[in-house]
Image (tube, helix red, strand yellow):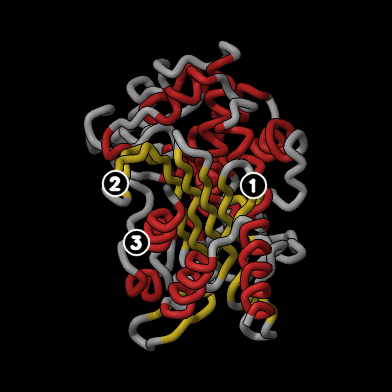
Amino acid sequence: MKRLLGLFILFALADNLFGQSPSINNFIDSFAKKNNFNGTILIQKKSKITYQKSFGLANFQFKVPNKTETKYKIASITKLFTSVLIMQLYESGKIDLDKTIKIYLPDYKGAGGDKVTIHQLLNHTSGMKNIDTITSIESAVKNGVPVYQKPRTTDELIEKYCSDTLVNEPGKVFDYNNADYIILGKIIEKVYNKTYEQAVKEKFLQPLNMTNSGLLYQQNIIDGLADTYFYRDDIKKLVPDLPVYMANWYAAGSMYSTTNDLLKFSNALFGLKLIKKETLEKLTKPGLDNYGYGIWSYQSELNNKKYNVVKRPGQIMGSQTMLFRFLDEDITIIILSNTGTTSLDNFVYEISKRIVQ
């Protein structure tokens, strides 16, 4: 009996050394199984990775498992990279957030050229016509996804899809619109006088040693990149994503990464290695719909206590992502998935309840 008690204590101590609670392990395992989760989850608390585990398959055809090193399409987490690039330019005095699009893109022909400010692009209150008109999986299967199913240069994207009429007065209505961040990507290129990809590499990937991150292009094969699958209700099964050109999401959603690389970016951003404290506060200040610059910022009530949190989700068909950070607690949760089967909002909320004190 004493020997059994000693073994129990030993295992409990080992669990504590790794910072992993049996209850959080059991919950995540159960939730992942119940919701057919495929992907990788990372939790950092008090500057230490306390949980990291992968589930399911990166490729269904060949039964390739997801691993810690698996690269995922991170969809709209890309927008946070874009907003931080803009805020770095703001800090250096090269961009005025209250200036309009045409100040930085003189050839821009859209109706909002001399009306829409950088601030309004960043917080999705530009008032521009939304380019994402597909409202359901059924519609996408039937009609395709027009903006993304033909290769386009960034100039073509802006001229054809991001230069339309204004449907709302700028600054008055929140409308989540990829066009806003496509335009911001082109502004970054003009001000830096280099491509968006070069700016991302020089400002983030190289200095932070994010060697497993980059931009997606149809002509490039990315070693270890998970294939993506979405669920079709009409036939009740997972199927490969529709054929699209990921580069068309550009500064709004064309990046890939790993949980470890995104943790490096998150720690650098919130650790004030990328922008100053005052600039970070401006980036995370909630506006309409609790949206800041490329990120949602709000109070979340967990276990009868309110916490200031930021959330950067993303989804493109089967690609589902979540970067979730407590602003006043050293807690970060990153979830990357290659199937559209799980509500990551629910998942991260349930995980959060179990790890806050």
Nearer-the-camera pick, 262 or 126: 262
Residue, far bottom: 235
Q: How many residues crowd around disc 2 within 10 Å: few (fewer than 14), some, or many (20 or more)? A: few
Q: Position of residue 334 (x, y in %)?
A: 54, 53
Residue 245 visible to the viewer? no
On the rendered structure, is 205 left or right of 191? right
Sequence-first disc among 1 and 3: 1
> So how many labels did they put on this image?
3
Residue at image coords 68%, 68%: 10
Which mark, by number, is residue 301?
A: 2
Q: Secondary structure at mark 2?
A: strand
Residue 54 is at least partly visible in this image:
yes
- The residue that label 3 is drawn on is 134
Tell me if 72 is positioned left or right of 206 in this view: left
Q: Earlier in the sequence, mark 1 or mark 2?
A: 1
- Residue 202, x across and y down, in percent: 74, 32
Under mark 3, the amino acid is Ile
Residue tagged by mark 1? Answer: 48
Query: What amino acid is at disc 1?
Result: Lys
Mark 1 to mark 3: distance in Å?
41 Å
Q: Amino acid at mark 2?
A: Glu
Label located before the other in sequence (2 or 3): 3
Q: Is the residue marked by circle 1 packed among few (<14), some (14-19), or many (20+) residues within 10 Å? A: few
Which class describes the residues within 10 Å of circle 3: few (<14), some (14-19), or many (20+)? some
Q: Nearer the viewer, mark 2 or mark 3?
A: 2
